[in-house]
Image: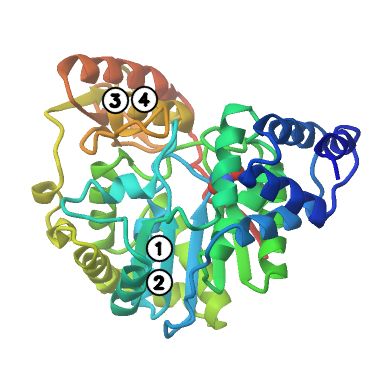
Amino acid sequence: VRAPDLIARKRDGGELTADELEWLVSGYLAGAVSEGQIAALLMAGVLRGFTPEEARALTDVFVASGESVDLSVLDGPTIDKHSTGGVGDATTLLVAPLLAAAGARLVKLSGRGLGHTGGTLDKLEAIPGMRVDLSPAELLDVAREVGCVVAAQSAALVPADKAIYALRDVTATVAAPALIASSVMAKKLAAGAQTIVLDVKAGDGAFLPTVDAAVDLAQLCVTIGAEAGRRCSALVTAMDTPLGRAIGNAVEVAECATLLSAPPAGRLAEVALELAATALTLATGADDARARLERCWSSGAALERLAAMIAAQGGDAGVCDDPAGVLPAAPVVLPVLADRAGVVAALPARAVGELAAALGAGRARKDDAVDPAVGIVLEVDVGDEVARGDRLATVHARSDTAAEAAAERLRALVVLSDGPVAPPPTVLRRIG
Ligand code: URA
């Protein structure tokens, strides 16, 4: 086998076998196939397309490149949840304790934010004392004791995906459905849960702007999961508008604690309940999953599980009762007021996410640090009527200059119209 021949076959629109893909990827990890050759293969695949069979083969190669987590020691159904990334998307902080309160075991290995999207690990680390780097034994202990655990992925899991994702990142080869599906599903399969629910975002603030592209990706992921013997479903959810009101790290943790202390309300709660209900139905066959989860929410049981998870991971669980008293606060808090009356017609997710990242809540490069305290809290949603002078949002910033610049930009981003506007959708499609 010669790497140039395999690359040429993909360049000319041909298909590679599972053995050939395995040879290329393991050769790359061992240094026998060069970075340039893998980059050329990836670009040929982005332009020509990888087949679903190639996606499945790549998933297997990625999983086999490292260790897998064994969750069979846990009682109860094991569930994992993955989002393709959005703005104001703190669903994991709601789904994890909800499922734990309903008797399932959610073991989630999360990521960090990049670009305009946030990451669950950054949000959790805004809580004083919270640890996300857990050993495999700690991961299982917290899952057993609390019912949910959210931690960082160890370097031993799917190292081939790590190496190839880093290369895709710098060679403009991320955006190929088969590459995304194999990268996401390899991590989910190696993380060990029997039930996997995916939240594939579609819209301006998502990786994939169109619903059709999101449906295709969701279908591919669900097929890969099912063929690996897991119960797997996906929801395609709207990401044209930030999902929650808060965009940042401490502000999103505060929003989740506040949301869980009252009956569920709003789009973030709706998507979290739908993801949790999809997972619980799939895992247990229950036909009343949504009603059970709503009871877990309204009774305070889910908030109590969130506090227990935070305490078990070394964090200050007081954040659940008194978020403002526990979380880091930004020195400058500036309201953004409407300069005219109207109906909110658009809150563009990507631009709002970029603005929060520019305040310091996100990172441009993987090794940048984030500022836990800064961010944006929207006070209105699409469809709301506002009068001149009403508060549209609150900016939490490190300095007066940063706050004023962000407030001015945010005022320009909130599109006001004169006629009525429908509220944004939540769940767009269900797959699997
Ligand atoms: N997230 C992943 O984990 N992998 C991709 O390829 C894209 C997004």
Sequence-wise, the earlier of marks 4 and 1 is 1
**Label 1 secondary element:** helix
Question: Does any atom of ligand 1 lie closer than 8 Å to the CB of label 3?
Answer: no
Q: Quote the CA–CA distance across marks 2 and 4.
A: 32 Å
Q: Quote the CA–CA distance across marks 4 and 3.
A: 6 Å
| Residues tagged 4 and 3 counted as in contact (Cβ below 8 A) | yes
Say what amino acid the circle numbered 1 marks.
Answer: Val
What residue is shown at x 44% (from left), y 35% (from top)? 114
Residue bearing the label numbered 1: 95
Say what amino acid the circle numbered 2 marks.
Answer: Leu
Query: Counting other residues with Cα less than 10 Å from the Cα at mark 3, is it few (<14), some (14-19), or many (20 or more)?
Result: many
> Residue 73 sits in which quadrant?
bottom left
Q: Nearer the viewer, residue 111 or 197?
A: 111
| Residues tagged 1 and 2 counted as in contact (Cβ below 8 A) | yes
Q: How many marks?
A: 4
> Residue 354 sits in which quadrant?
top left
Q: Is residue 273 left or right of residue 148?
A: right
Residue bearing the label numbered 3: 359
Image quadrant occupied by the C terminus: bottom right
Residue 355, numbered label: 4
Residue bearing the label numbered 2: 99
Q: Is residue 58 left or right of residue 90?
A: right
